Image: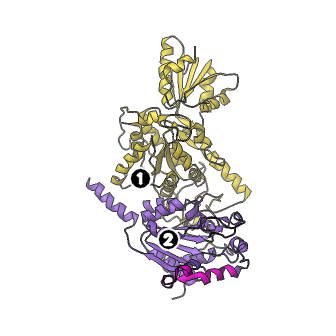
Chain colours: A yellow, B purple
Amino acid sequence: MQGNQAMSEGAIYAGAKFFAGYPITPSSEIAEECSKVMLKIGGVYMQMEDEIASIAAVIGASLAGAKAFTATSGPGFSLMQENLGLAVMGEVPCVVIDVQRRGPSTGLSTKPAQGDIMQLRWGRHGDQSVIALCPATVSECFFMTVKAFNFAEKFRVPVIMAPDEIIGHMRENFSLPTPGEVEVIDRKKPSGSPENYLPFAADKDGVAPLASYGSDYVFHVSSSMHGPDGCSNNDPANAAWRVAQLHRKIEMHRDEIVITKTFSAEDAEILLIAFGATTRSSRAAALELRKRGVRAGVLQLITLWPFADKEVASLGGRAKTVIVPEMNYGGQMAGEVQKVLGGGADIRRVNSYNGEIITPQDILKAIR
Amino acid sequence: MSHATGTKYLKDGVLPHMWCSGCGIGVMLGAMLRAFEELNYKNTDTVVVTGIGCTGKADDYLKTNALHTTHGRALPYATGIKAFNPKLHVVVLMGDGDSVTIGGNHFIHAARRNIDLTAIVINNFNYGMTGGQVSGTTPGGCYTSTTSWGNPERDFDICALAEVAGANYVARETPYHGWELKELIKEALGKKGFSLVEVFSPCPTHFGKNNDMKQTREMLDWLRDRGIPADRYGKLSNDEKRAHFATGKLVDRNDPDFNTRYEDTRLKAARG
């Protein structure tokens, strides 16, 4: 199965019933797949007039009760940013898949990149936290999409899946789980009297129950600063509480959200920190180094945001040399690693920005 | 039967509203809520979706479900709601900036899809909330805070745009005609498919002030004198047409709406 198809399958497994999107390479297979499947499972597929409308329709459908998602690439992801901010502010569960391609601008539309790492985190105006996941295999495309929906539903946030073009278009075998085999989480619904329902009064877990339009619970959702009832509220104390709460509900579940994998990393003197397609080259490079008697290992970041600071500090602190290969110019993730390990650490950046993958040989060169 | 007041949809303690004296948004909102009441809409099955600007503040007054969105994007949000749950009454409140300036693309595509929404557009010919700047419906030559020597551009005819884009129902009225406005909104709400009610509205604070209509009353008179019921408007000479605008029901047709067509396609998919 192809990575893009696996993400559609993962979304369907997680219970997605609504897809709105706009065609863009290298993500279009996801829309094509959904256009066929959604009609057969009682869901809705809509091709909208642009990516701005796509994410808006996804958010609207989510508030009407659907598990909803969209898929795009760089130029479309840029267009989605403002309305993605509404999903953060209005605490609307949804999933956005950004199959990363080489920019800037139209760039090399069929070639891979990992240049959106900072846009994932900071692409929207204002001040907010998001969750972003990055698969490195076709199997992870499936399972991490299920996870993305689970996080979105559980924490009432938009979750971004950010594979690169290589992973989106790669074909691999894996076993599809049977229904019920993998945990699927649905959003918490209100249960008290409808008159007392407050859609933005967070429970102890930092998340308020979310009703659906058309249920007995009538509610307001707003892009503007709002109180617990969802209506405009400009009180500074309320604004401070709201902004902090939007960050806090992610921070307080940080250990559940941050997913990493390691390959022979426990005793690594040379630690490769990688994500997406570069994970694969990193594993090959680490295996080669082990053959040569060098203690090398890989820390794979599946959750890109929030950043895996503890894991990087723990394994990176033990290593003599840390290498961060990534398909962007400056080392967007390497900067985060540097922040955690400090200026004295031996951190080497391996970057490609010509639309080509980083090979194991490219990584090995950084060690010589 | 007593007359509908629509007040049962208004939150407690929200009046007087925030809009300037002489503004048409309050009249529009009153007409809409009376129409809701006459159609027996429930808060639970109604969603009011708003954009940004003076008109976009309307959701804060309502007891119905509401979604206050981003500038120009109210229609695609509403489209997602309606496409997923066709049973809901979805009403979209926008200004001229929301509907046909920043959001023009969504407007024509919502009409093309003939999605079963009612869009009510307050057209006050300028951006009131931000201080009276020029918009896509400011008539050529008019003065705004960003066209000090007159608007060099032409304006959109919102109703004509909705008609050619495929809306099932199109009407225009002014706040001077509150009862007629309520009747048109009611008809639009009852109409399957995309319906548009454009409300030409005074903005005495900005547009009126900048265009020799400083008094609250003057801009309302200006609209009253230029609005002509559609049947009579059709008989005017071209010169007279340019100096006036048509009011009342302008388009009424029964093309299948998005959800109906989608259901048909679903049946095809089920057959394989």
- Residue drawn at x 62%, y 68% is B138
**Is residue A238 or residue B271 the one in the foreground?**
B271
What span is colored magenta in the figure? B218-240
Residue at 54%, 73% (x, y): give it: B198
Report the quarter where the C terminus of chain A lies: top right
Residue A23 left/right relative to B223: left
Q: Secondary structure at mark 1?
A: loop
Q: Is residue B11 above or below residue A190?
A: below
Mark 1 lies on residue: A17
Q: How many marks?
A: 2
Inspect the magenta stretch and tell me whether residue B230 lies in it. yes
- Chain label for disc 1: A
Q: Amino acid at mark 2?
A: Ala
Q: Residue furthest top?
A: A293
A109 vs A271, left or right, is left
From the top left corner, tell me how far across and down residue A339 is, in percent: 67, 30
The alpha-carbon separation of the residues under discs 1 and 2 comes to 35 Å
Quadrant hosting residue A294: top right
Q: Position of residue B219 (x, y in %)?
A: 67, 79
Image height check: is A144 above or below B261?
above
| Circle 2 chain | B
Q: Residue at x 69, y 66 (%)?
A: B132
Residue nearest the observer in this picture, B191 or A356: A356
The percent coordinates of residue B17 (x first, y second) are 67, 73
* Category of crowding for the residue at label 2, using alpha-carbon neighbours closer than 10 angstroms: few (below 14), some (14–19), many (at least 20): few
Q: Is residue A230 above or below residue B230?
A: above
For label 1, count other residues whose C-alpha is less than 10 Å away and answer few (under 14), some (14-19) or many (20+): many
Q: Amino acid at mark 1?
A: Lys
Whole-percent x, y for residue A67 in the image: 46, 52
Taking B189 as reference, is B56 above or below it? above
The residue identified by callout 2 is B160
